[in-house]
Amino acid sequence: MRWITVQRSVFAAAALLGQTACAVGPDYQRPMTPLRPFHNVGITAPSSGVHASDIAWWTSFGDSELNRIETRVLTMNLDLRAAFARVLQGRAVARSAAAQMLPTIDFNPQVSATRLSEEGLIGHIVREVPHFNRDYREYNVGGVASWELDVAGGLRRAHEAARDEFQAAEAEQAGVRLSIAADAADTYFRIRGIQLSLRDAREAVAAREKLLDLVQQRSDRGVADDRERSQAAAELETEKQRVLDIERQKETQLNRLDVLMGAQPGTYAGELQVTTELPTVPAPATAAQSLDVLRRRPDVVASERRLAARNADIGVALAAYYPKISLQGALGFESMSPRQLFVAPGFQPTATGALRWRIFDFGKISSEVAHARGNYAEALADYRSTMLHAAEDVENAFFHLGQTHRTLASETRDVHALERVTILTQQSYAAGAMGLGEVLQSRLNLLKAQENLTSARAEEVRAAVECFRAMGGGWRI
């Protein structure tokens, strides 16, 4: 009992020493990155009073089909599953690094059977002893506890690095989630815009067919020549080819959306056959300070966490300059007979301590420290570069959104003007002042303008998605 008490005291003192010792290396501090307020965010007036204020930012578009697609994407997407697997890997590494600071206890009962050689040293001596038995068994039951004292804090710094890498993996998973959700929304709005453009293009084909039929009738009467008829036929074929191109774009985007939902292309295409109008563009939630906005972006968070991990690696390298102390204790029973195993004479305790100190290594530790500091300098530059690129993304996205607002207003005015022209042309045709050809041509001009307006609306919605992506999605302010 006295031996056990002494051993417990030794381990308690070692634990206190490991907990109170300082960790070598610099303590991490987030670097200061001064940024001015965004100069493009404030100039963009939202087209509605709807604001995205939750991480499920796509719900602010008010499109139930988009909500269903996003739910399916975030559940079934394979890239997102791979990112989650990387998070699990990082969590396991962090737990393993934390376990390195704790004692290891092994339980190793053994039973051995031996037949002693009569020609060996001991067998040669005792073989003449009457009733000598060459066969014997040995029973050993016990456990071994080993512990490396974290005197310099190298293990703690290694745990910090593993923890920071785990947090970086979590941020990267959030980044993958944001990117995939934005890709799905962008693809969905592309499909809706293509469907509307396809509707307008097919109406244009019908108008071109009527115009060609009219030219053919005039040609039969000798009023129109072959050049006019050939021109009308060529324009009709061009319009039909454009319909084929739009249908190809539609099929491509539908297949892409299915892959984003983790399904074989063609699985869910039938759900989007009905053409619907594009939703109203919401205003992405914004914060007052650009630095607060950018620090919410998953790529910035991941870069900052990796910077913290590289800072901890410096402490891991510096800890090699200091001695390493390890303790080992064993408690067990050993006996030649299982009936005499757990008795006082068979009790066999052992305690050992070891010191390992690298005195001279031809500059190996110094090189490792320099390598760690170089990695930190690289991570710091990467972090600042990530911040600048994030600011660039936000500025470009909101400038693009502002441009789409102006383009949409211009295309809307153009459509209204051509609608007026079409009405006046039809009135003139009814009065006999214009022919049917002028009416059909004005209709074609209006269809072209409506298609441009549809493209502008789709571009506006996709630009809003890009703003959500650039700002890290929606969140509560």
Image (cartoon, grey):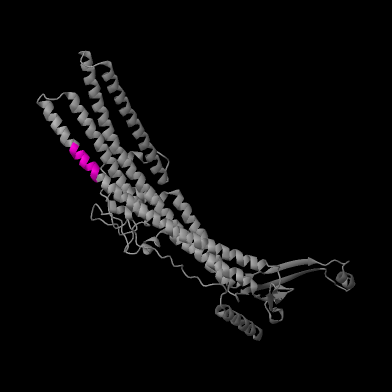
Tell me which corner region of the image, top left, top right, bottom left or bottom right, holds residue 274.
top left
Position of residue 371 measured from the top left corner of the image (x, y, whole percent): 60, 63
Which of the pair 275/438 is nearer the observer? 438
**In the rendered view, would you say 25 is above or below 53?**
below
**In the displayed image of the protein, which residue is found farthest to the left?**
431
**In the rendered view, would you say 219 is above or below 95?**
above
Which of the pair 180/1 is nearer the observer? 180
Position of residue 142 measured from the top left corner of the image (x, y, whole percent): 66, 73
Quadrant where the C terminus is found in the figure:
bottom left
Which of the pair 433/185 is nearer the observer? 433
Q: Residue at x 68, y 67 (%)?
A: 363
Queried whether the magenta region covers residue 413, the answer comes back as yes
Quadrant where the N terminus is found in the figure:
bottom right
Residue 312 makes an appearance in the image: yes
Which of the pair 39/94 is nearer the observer? 39
Q: Is residue 17 left or right of residue 179?
A: right
Tell me which corner region of the image, top left, top right, bottom left or bottom right, holds residue 432.
top left
**In the rendered view, would you say 102 is above or below 470?**
below
Position of residue 225 measured from the top left corner of the image (x, y, whole percent): 25, 16
Q: Residue at x 52, y 68 (%)?
A: 160
Q: Residue at x 17, y 32 (%)?
A: 422
Q: Secondary structure of the magenta portion, mostly?
A: helix
Q: Residue at x 38, y 51 (%)?
A: 181
Q: Is residue 221 left or right of residue 341?
A: left
Q: Is residue 281 left or right of residue 8?
A: left
Q: Which residues are magenta?
A: 409-417
Position of residue 285 measured from the top left corner of the image (x, y, whole percent): 31, 59
Queried whether the magenta region covers residue 398, the answer comes back as no
